[in-house]
Image (cartoon, helix red, strand yellow):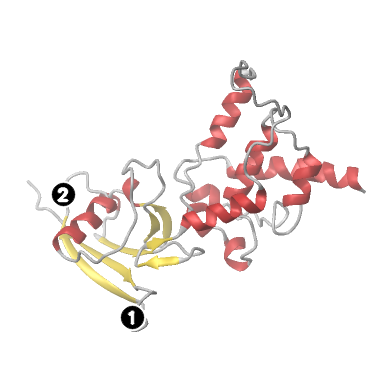
Amino acid sequence: MSQARQLTFSIFRYDPQDPNDKPQMVNYYITETPGMTVFIALNKIRETQDPSLQFDFVCRAGICGSCAMVINGKPTLACRTLTANFPGAEMSLMPLPGFELIGDLSVNTGKFMRELAERLQLWLQPNDTDMDIHRIETPMAPEEAAKLYELERCVECGVCVSACATKQMRDTFVGAVGLMKIARFELDSRDSRSSDDFYHVIGNQDGVFGCMTLLGCQDTCPKDLPHMQQIAYLRRKMSISVTNII
């Protein structure tokens, strides 16, 4: 029987609420167990070594998106990252860039997502304003429902935002998550907005025409969502809108 590995975690530590604290990397050492994920390792560190360590989690199943962080330079979910995937037994953990830091590995993705939703009006604006709750629900073709479901799988983890070079250079860029959600409503036949309406929201350098197509969102999305496919789709729709406006 092979001996269990000793894992080394170099973790970013900093409390922005403490004026005397300074950013630093702190090493922690634990013994690897079968099937261990980075999430499990972090909980073990907090339980047995340092209860002050801050990181986020809810579901532990890759559904809530809360445990997103940068692991060995790649933004991803801690609960879906096996320590066995790192043959060197050394892992560096950093908070997601592009978000307000709460402390250590914890960032405020919720604030970003709320502001994005308000800025882009990411809610259904129905064609029919009749709000009779006793009325039969409007039917939808299975093919359309399948397309919407695919885009609804986004868990708002923020990984695509942190992996986006355009977002890091231009803070006002809406990012792949914003464009994905716009595509979801543009595809929805129940939404009253036209392509021209969406053009006035994302038809600029802060929107669909600002993407440099470096595929960071596509390469790192933990749900394997078709980011580039939807960005290309929106670009075609917005280009048609530009022609119509001119």
Q: Quadrant of residue 150?
A: top right
For the residue pair 18 and 65, the one nearer the viewer reads as 18
Under mark 2, the amino acid is: Thr
Q: Which mark is residue 33?
A: 2
3D distance between C-alphas at marks 2 and 1: 33 Å
Residue 92 lies left or right of residue 244; in this view the side is left
Under mark 1, the amino acid is: Asp
Residue 106 lies, in percent from the top left, at 37, 61
Residue 152 visible, this angle:
yes
Residue at 42% x, 58% y is 74
Residue 125 lies, in percent from the top left, at 69, 36
Going by the picture, which residue comes out furthest to the top? 136
Residue 137 lies left or right of residue 191; in this view the side is left
For the residue pair 218 and 178, the one nearer the viewer reads as 178
Residue 156 lies left or right of residue 118; in this view the side is left
Above or below: residue 27 compared with residue 85? below
Residue at 45% x, 60% y is 108
Residue 127 lies, in percent from the top left, at 73, 29
Q: Quadrant of residue 70?
A: bottom left
Foreground label between 2 and 1: 1
Q: Which residue is labeled 1 in the image?
A: 21
| Number of other residues with Cα within 10 Å of mark 1, as a class: few under 14, some 14 to 19, many 20 or more | few
Mark with earlier residue (2, 1): 1
Going by the picture, which residue comes out furthest to the left? 1
Q: Quadrant of residue 235?
A: top right
